[in-house]
Amino acid sequence: MSTAQTPLLFTPLKLRELTLKNRLCLSPMCTYGAQDGMAGDWHLVHLGQYALGGWGIVFVEATAVEERGRITYGDVGLWKDAQIAPLKRVTQFLRQHGAAPAIQLAHAGRKSSTARPWHGMGILKDADAKARGENPWKTVSSTPDLMDDTWHEPHALSTDELKGIVESWRAAARRAREADFDIVEVHCAHGYLMHQFLSPLINKRNDAYGGDIAGRMRLPLEVAEAVRGEWPKDKPVFVRISSIDGMDGGWTIEDSVTFSKELKARGIDVIDCSSGGVVGSATARAVPRFFGFQVPFAETVRKGAGMKTMAVGLIVDPEHAENILQTGQADIIAVAREALVDPYWAHHAARALSPELMTYADWNKEYQFWLDKREPVMRKLRAEGNARA
Ligand SMILES: Cc1cc2nc3c(=O)[nH]c(=O)nc-3n(C[C@H](O)[C@H](O)[C@H](O)COP(=O)(O)O)c2cc1C
């Protein structure tokens, strides 16, 4: 699929030596189906369907770099070597079916030790321990403040302990490399540990890792450097940011541009522009919702830092996605919930954007032959206005 009229969305994109077949990305989505941080059949089938569905990038959900950095007991992890092999099964399947396998590394900090959505979310309590043997654990953060009085009180990491945090990210990146991912993303958004250092609403430290923006960026930049250092030079590294906190006195879009420039200087390739989450749920509604509500952030970072950006958030319509790229607001489109509704959204978008160009050539060979054969029959019947029997 590469002619002059090919939609930009379906034009390959080169990031370092990695060529994406299109610019559509399955956004990272926690599904909380792991056992002891191990990916299983669920992850293979769930993520595999997006490779079959035509997505250029398929992200494994937020994957904990430390056991205590898990959001729930069901999170995928890369805190030990035994977790590499089950993920390698996933990367092999995704690549074999044309998607670039990607993984988001994460540490939830003070937002760790919670129940899965279907167990009521919120912090783990005695009832969870009784029902499923899931005991709460001590969480960590930049400061000892609770998110609100319904949350665990975190331990404020000492300056020395921060070295261990950086090392856990480095080791997880090494494991992700050994699991054969093409893209690694550092999760600095949604109120998780890196964001707990970035945001002035949370970080009240008075050592070198707090204070002004240089201090608050220090740990995330050290982590980004460590991950970049472990990652093959020919493969890209993404960073997801909360572009704004959306609250008085919080992180601003200007801060995001400053941070992105620093990340660029450290070899980060793409900024994935999300927002919010500094208090409350991961993407709590501090930021008003409308279709493409975070696209202006991707555009500002793209122009301000001179970097490639990924736009995400209520992008559900192929024409809208194409327009975002055509107008230079972002370089990649990530989709989350609409992809749950329709895992074949990418394939359907290709046909919707230019039906005259599209065959089933991009579909997996097991389906393609039959669908190509059916196509002229479908066209003829539709042209004839053929009534259904
Ligand atoms: C079930 C679910 C799980 C999510 N898990 C993650 C995650 O692991 N990491 C992350 O950065 N964002 C996560 N998100 C946020 C999405 O990646 C995405 O940014 C957000 O849903 C907005 O995009 P959408 O409107 O296309 O759904 C999650 C969202 C959903 C719905």
Image (spheres, grey):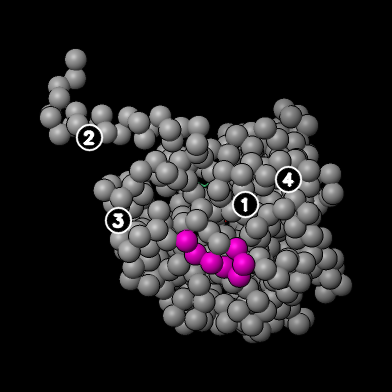
The boundaries of the magenta stretch are 12-18
Q: Label 1: how many residues lie within 10 Å, few (<14), some (14-19) or many (20+)?
A: many
Q: Where is residue 179 in the image (x, y as percent from the top left)?
A: 75, 50
From the image, tell me which residue sits under label 4: 88
Ligand 1 within 8 angstroms of badge 2 C-beta: no
Q: Earlier in the sequence, mark 3 or mark 1?
A: 1
Choose between 142 and 84: the one closer to the eye.
Answer: 84
Q: Which residue is drawn at 73% across and 74% down?
A: 225
Task: Give the distance between the C-alpha atoms of the residues marked 4 and 3, in whole angstroms.
Answer: 35 Å
State which mark lies toward you, 2 or 1. Answer: 2
**Residue at 61% in and 44% down:** 96
Q: Which amino acid does label 2 sit on?
A: Arg
Q: In this view, does 223 lie to the left or right of 241?
A: right
Helix, strand or loop at mark 3: helix
**Mark 4 vs 1, N-terminal side:** 4
Measured as percent of width and height from the top left, residue 62 is found at 64, 52
- Residue 2 falls within the magenta-colored stretch: no
Q: Distance between the residues labelled 4 and 2?
A: 41 Å
Residue 27 visible, this angle? no
What residue would you read off at disc 1?
101
- Secondary structure beneath disc 2? helix
Q: Which residue is drawn at 19% across and 28% down?
A: 381
User: In the image, is residue 180 above or below residue 275?
Assistant: above
Look at mark 3 in the image and give the residue it sits on.
319
